[in-house]
Amino acid sequence: MKNPALAVALSVALTPLFIAHAHADKLDDIIGSGTLRCAVTLDFPPMGFRDAGNKPAGFDVDYCHDLAKILGVEAEVVETPFPDRIPALVSGRADVIVASTSDTLERAKTVGLTVPYFAFQMVVLTRDDTGINSYDDLKGKPLGNTSGTYEAIALEKDQKSWGSGSFRAYQSQNDTLLAVAQGHIDATVVTNTVAAATLKSGKYKNLKIAGNAPYVIDYVSLGAKRNEYGLINYLNLFVNQQVRTGRYKELFVKWVGTDIPPADLVVPQVYY
């Protein structure tokens, strides 16, 4: 630039913008606010639910509190249905997603996802009277699942490829389980943790597990706004520390129990 005076003027004018941008960091904002707002789904036991006192509880709830404790702030659980997880983050209602969110490439176009903090195996859940004993038996049956979940996308895709039967989407996990129990649909696919918790609760006496669903392991991540690299890096390290310190296993045993082995977060040739 040939005009030194103009260069100085522009420099002075733009400096506050650069400074503001440099300090516009979500991690700093969370620490400064004194509160970490976690989007958590509370109809997905044992990951998230309401206890007998109507208080948020579960693996994801404890995970949120662990993160808040490390940051030196208070945890605020923002109850968020599965379909609203990303909107809650994008709209600013939540700072992070701690809601068993599958790490799909499609989601990564919208939000930043961490390394896996949990993993699920999928199983078929049906009634005793349907004659369904395996995933292959689902062909031609009325099926359904919870909108926006990994298993819903996979099940609906298969149902369409079979060219028979039907598929219905529900807004919550509770709605899906109730639909199976009451006969509105014959079966659904849920995580092994949900199936175990549902049968253990005794709420639905007529439900059973009918084998595994032939889906890949569902690895789930914490979520933050896509451009918040500092926060995402911190969350990745936090997940790492939860495993290294034994806290991950402790929470797994607390909420899932010992009937199911702790979910293996190792992805062969990727995460060791």
Image: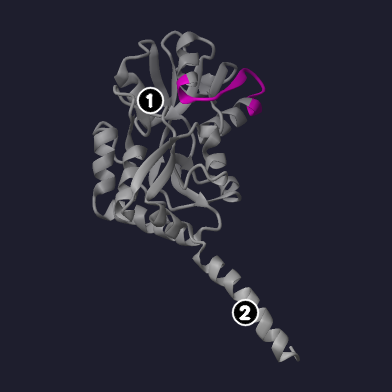
Q: Quadrant of the N terminus?
A: bottom right
Residue 105 belongs to the span the image colors magenta: no
Q: Is residue 81 visible?
A: yes
The residue lying toward the viewer, choosing from 59 and 161, is: 59
In the image, is 12 to the left or to the right of 202? Answer: right
Dot 1 alpha-carbon crowd within 10 angstroms: few under 14, some 14 to 19, many 20 or more:
many
State the separation of the CA atoms marked 2 and 1.
Answer: 62 Å
**Label 2 element class:** helix
The image quadrant where one finds the C terminus is: bottom left
**Visible residue check, residue 217:** no
Q: Residue at x 48, y 26 (%)?
A: 189
Q: In x, y percent, where is residue 135? A: 49, 25
Q: Where are the magenta residues, as a range?
A: 160-174
Quick check: 11 above or below 267?
A: below
Secondary structure at numbered mark 1:
helix
Residue at 30% across, 54% down: 70
- Type of amino acid under label 1: Ala
Label 2 crowd (10 A; few <14 / some 14-19 / many >=20):
few
Residue designated by label 2 = 12
Residue 48 vertical position relative to residue 131 in the rendered view, above or below: below
Residue at (50, 25) in percent of width and height:
172
